[in-house]
Image: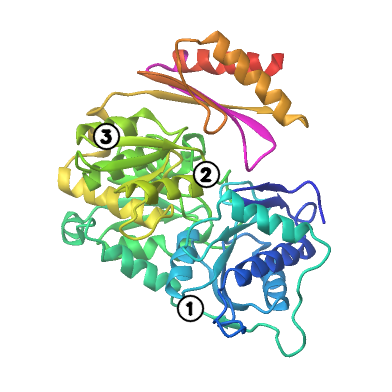
Amino acid sequence: MSDTLMISVSGVRGLVGTDLTPEVVARWAAAFGTWAANGIRDTGNGKRGRRVRIVLGRDARTSGPMFAAAAIAGLTSVGCDVVDVGLVATPTVQLAVEYHRAGGGIILTASHNPIEWNALKFVGSDGIFLDSAAGTRVRELAAGDSLPRANYNAIGGVKADSDAISRHLAAVLALRGVDVRAIRKRRFRLALDTVRGAGGAIMPELLERLGCRVTAINLETDGLFPRPPEPVPENLKALSALVRRTKADVGIAVDPDVDRLAMVDEKGRPIGEDYTLAFAVRAVRPSSHQSVVCNLSTSLVVEDAARDFGARVVRAPVGEAHVARKIIALKAVIGGEGNGGVMYPALHVGRDAPVAGALLLGLLARERATVSELVGRAPRYTIVKAKVERGRRVTERMDGVYAALRARFPDANADTQDGLRLAWPDRWLHVRPSGTEPIIRLIAEAPTSADAQRLIEEGRQSCAAS
């Protein structure tokens, strides 16, 4: 088994054919199936209860069918029954786990990573990605000498579920926080880019059912990304041009597994992924006794949005599982991450681009304002992001980086939940090792680009000196 896989709370990622092979996928799937089966309680008479059921889904990457076959082999080899939902969005799989009352789910997706990557993401029986304790146990099983393989008459079965997407769409349209009638009345002109990922299987139908007049690019679900797949402003030039050409009210882009959504305003300008969560907060209108949860790298625009309604913002470590569990613990009304991931527990506690899109359109319909007008109503900030290669001695190096930065900025509010976040009233710097790539991430936000860049350079210098 490869020892160069990226293993984290997000799952297991690797380069197709190098780190990630069918043999590796089958073993990790078998390990996950074993972990899930061990979580089923005995019936009390010494016999195992129902056989564990695992939901399997994938995004549109070219390696997806091959790895799906390998994952099915691994799961059935340890006696798990597989519910195969096929090519779907990540949140569709999470909802299917809950619907089928499954022991867990596996999603074959490398999310925003480039085309040469793929991954396994593990979902627990609650529809939420595994926490660190569960993830550690799956890793131990995968690294062990043996797994409890089923004999000839205990091998698991496989069945297809072709209704997972339709259930997901129906659930979004039924949300009390989504005013379908008001959205349909507006007849929005909308430009859409699904980057030839799984979004083509769900986003057009959702938007059309909301009464939008949709013009789209990259709807094919063949995984042949025509651009870098992450929906950051520099990758949305074609969508911006489409907005201008079609005079659209808004442009929407999703990532390959459809858990993140980014917007382009009516003038063809990408406004940044953080506004997705900020707009969702404004759509939900949390009250003064409610909480909003976001991660440590999320923009201050989310705090501003929550503050306008008197709601409290609580920050969690980066990673959907961390935010999800904080949402549950606080019974937060909404949460998410600054990368365009909205988590609306009225449906489920997972990042969900279809939910984000519906909330966004509901806000535009209610406010009867353009995207640029909504952006202009609140303070503006600039986020600057950078990457530094992290090398082998990650822990020792990062300790030195953190110490240097805290010494350099003794007046900052320091948060060490996930790396180091130094914060002031109108700016912040977050330095942390990535869980999905072999890099150190540097993210800074300030009222001006120059101010944010200065914070980034301080981070770079500390990394170089350690």
Which disc number belongs to residue 149?
Answer: none
Q: Which residue is mark 3?
A: 305
Q: Residue at x 72, y 71 (%)?
A: 74
Q: Residue at x 63, y 43 (%)?
A: 436
Give me the C-alpha separation between circle 3 and circle 2: 22 Å
Return the disc, 1 or 3, that comes first in the chain's sequence. 1
Return the disc, 1 or 2, that comes first in the chain's sequence. 1
Q: Is residue 390 visible?
A: no
Q: Is residue 165 visible?
A: yes
**Does the stretch in magenta take in 448?**
yes
Q: Helix or strand or loop: what does disc 3 sit on?
A: helix
Crowding around mark 2 (Cα neighbors within 10 Å: few <14, some 14 to 19, many 20+) is many
Q: Residue at x 36, y 50 (%)?
A: 191
Front residue of 358/49: it is 49
Q: Residue at x 74, y 55 (%)?
A: 16
Return the disc, 3 or 2, that comes first in the chain's sequence. 3
Crowding around mark 3 (Cα neighbors within 10 Å: few <14, some 14 to 19, many 20+) is many
Q: Which residue is mark 1?
A: 162
Residue 112, above or below 440? below
Q: Which residues are magenta?
A: 429-450
Q: Nearer the viewer, mark 1 or mark 3?
A: 3
- Count of numbered tags: 3
Across and down, in percent, residue 153 comes to: 73, 90
